[in-house]
Amino acid sequence: MEENLQRKAILLSLAALLVGSLLFIFGISIQTSYIPLIIYYVIAMFLYGSAFLSIFNQYKKQKQSIYVYILILTIVIICVSTYAFISKFQIFFT
């Protein structure tokens, strides 16, 4: 029973990272305006944050290395998305 809950938490957090990344990529690919980019960035950050908090709470319950790996992966994805957002945002105003 406990193993199923661990698997479910890991899969849901990875799914949130995937959906957030896909939405952000879609927002970056829109070339017309910066408003969709901001909206998709905010939605992606909410999904990344929920995935991070979910895994962090699981890590507090059970100290396993897979949780640390997913936490680091989430932080890297947040950093890359933020860098891409800032780079794309500067293109609109230069």
Image (spheres, helix red, strand yellow):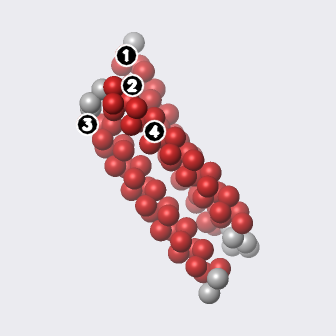
Q: CA distance from mark 2 to mark 1?
A: 6 Å
Is residue 38 visible to the viewer in this orientation of the structure? yes
Residue 28's place in the image compared with 45, above or below, is below
Q: Position of residue 7 (x, y in %)?
A: 40, 26
Residue found at x 44% / y 55%: 77
Label 2 SS: helix
Amino acid carrying mark 4 in the image: Leu
| Residue placed under numbered mark 2 in the picture | 6
Residue 63's place in the image compared with 80, above or below, is above
Q: Position of residue 31 (x, y in %)?
A: 69, 73
Between 67 and 3, the residue placed more toward the observer is: 67
Amino acid carrying mark 3 in the image: Ser
Query: Which quadrant is home to the C terminus?
Result: bottom right
Amino acid carrying mark 2 in the image: Gln
Apparent side of residue 80 relative to residue 65 in the rendered image (left or right): right
Asked whether the beta carbons under mark 2 and mark 1 sit within 8 Å of each other, the answer is yes
Label 1 SS: helix
Amino acid carrying mark 1 in the image: Glu
Apparent side of residue 60 relative to residue 78 in the rendered image (left or right): left
Q: CA distance from mark 3 to mark 1?
A: 17 Å
| Residue placed under numbered mark 3 in the picture | 65
Asked whether the beta carbons under mark 3 and mark 1 sit within 8 Å of each other, the answer is no
| Residue placed under numbered mark 1 in the picture | 2
| Residue placed under numbered mark 4 in the picture | 53
For the residues carrying marks 2 and 4, which lies nearer the camera in this image? Answer: 4
Q: CA distance from mark 1 to mark 4?
A: 19 Å
Apparent side of residue 53 relative to residue 37 in the rendered image (left or right): left
Q: Residues within 10 Å of mark 1 (few under 14, many from 20)?
A: few
